[in-house]
Image (tube, helix red, strand yellow):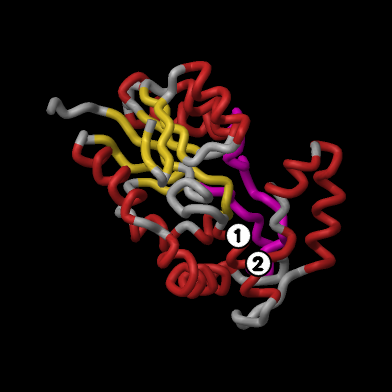
Amino acid sequence: MAIESGAAFFDVDKTLLPGTSMETLLARALLLGRLPGSFGWLPFFVEGLRLLPRGLTVARKANKGYLAGARPEEVQAWAEDVFAREAAPRIDALSHQWVEEERRRGRAIVLLTGMPDLLLGPFATAFSAELAVGTPLEIDPRGRLTGRRAGVHPYGEAKRGIAAGLCARRGWDPVRCSAYGDHASDAALLAWVGEPCAVDPDRGLRRIARERGWRILERGGAS
């Protein structure tokens, strides 16, 4: 098979990590006292109210207020703990198979997800990713997280924009790139690459994938 020059963009939550999100696992661990930290309820609600004018989805997905007051290194340690105990056992052989198939085709493996970038390290290691891009978080002068973003949240059109920037900088031809996602919000990125793959898609993405003839991958089989 000819070697292609390009990248494979993988969403993480509910795509490589089946059925759940890393933030859900982390938040639950904090609430149940399984980690040496606490869920920041007040900053979470305050940040949610601040984001609410941009829509309920943004207020929920872009809200990192629950991490306010923690140090970045603490969050990274929590991520390692939660990944080892709860995320890694959920990652199945198919996730690794999809990644390795893309690697054999000569594509760079890029994790592109809305989760905080501080949580991405274990996933990047597990999948030997060349790049891992998540949501950057703001750090105050004391070296603690404020619970707000410090940059672009990779979601919807913004995710496609990040991929386009990476392709421009790395010299990747979008037509020779692939993308994997599970949610209708991933459609902008999937429509932009040459080989879109809908993984265990939600209703909205399934409809779009069928209309456009995209590959649908399901853990019960592929279509």
**Contact, CB < 8 Å: mark 2 with mark 1?**
yes
Residue at the image point whose x is 34% and y is 59% from the top: 126
In the foreground, 103 or 101: 101
* Occupied quadrant, residue 58: top right
The foreground one among 223 and 8 is 223
At numbered mark 2, what does the secondary structure look like: helix, strand or loop? helix
Q: For residue 118, which numbered disc appears in the image?
A: none
Can residue 161 be spotted in the picture?
no
Up/down of 215 relative to 143, above or below: above
Residue positioned 86% across, 38% down in the render: 53
Q: Amino acid at mark 2?
A: Ala
**The disc labelled 1 sits on which kind of residue?**
Glu
Q: Is residue 212 left or right of residue 29?
A: left
Image height check: is 12 above or below 32? Answer: above
The residue located at (58%, 37%) in the rendering is 202
Residue 217 in the image: above or below residue 26: above
| Label 2 Cα crowd, 10 Å radius (few <14 / some 14-19 / many 20+) | some
Given the current orientation, which residue lies at the most extreme top position?
Answer: 212
Q: Which residues are magenta?
A: 134-158
Rendered image quadrant of residue 66: bottom right
Query: Badge 1 is on which residue?
Result: 23
C-alpha gap between disc 2 and disc 1: 6 Å
Q: Would residue 128 appear left or right of 48 to someone viewing this image? A: left
Please identify the quadrant where the C terminus is shown: top left
Q: Does 65 appear in magenta?
A: no
Image position, residue 203 (x, y; %): 61, 33
Residue placed furthest toward the front? 220
Q: Quadrant of residue 42?
A: bottom right
Residue displayed at 57% across by 52% down: 115
126 displayed left or right of 20: left
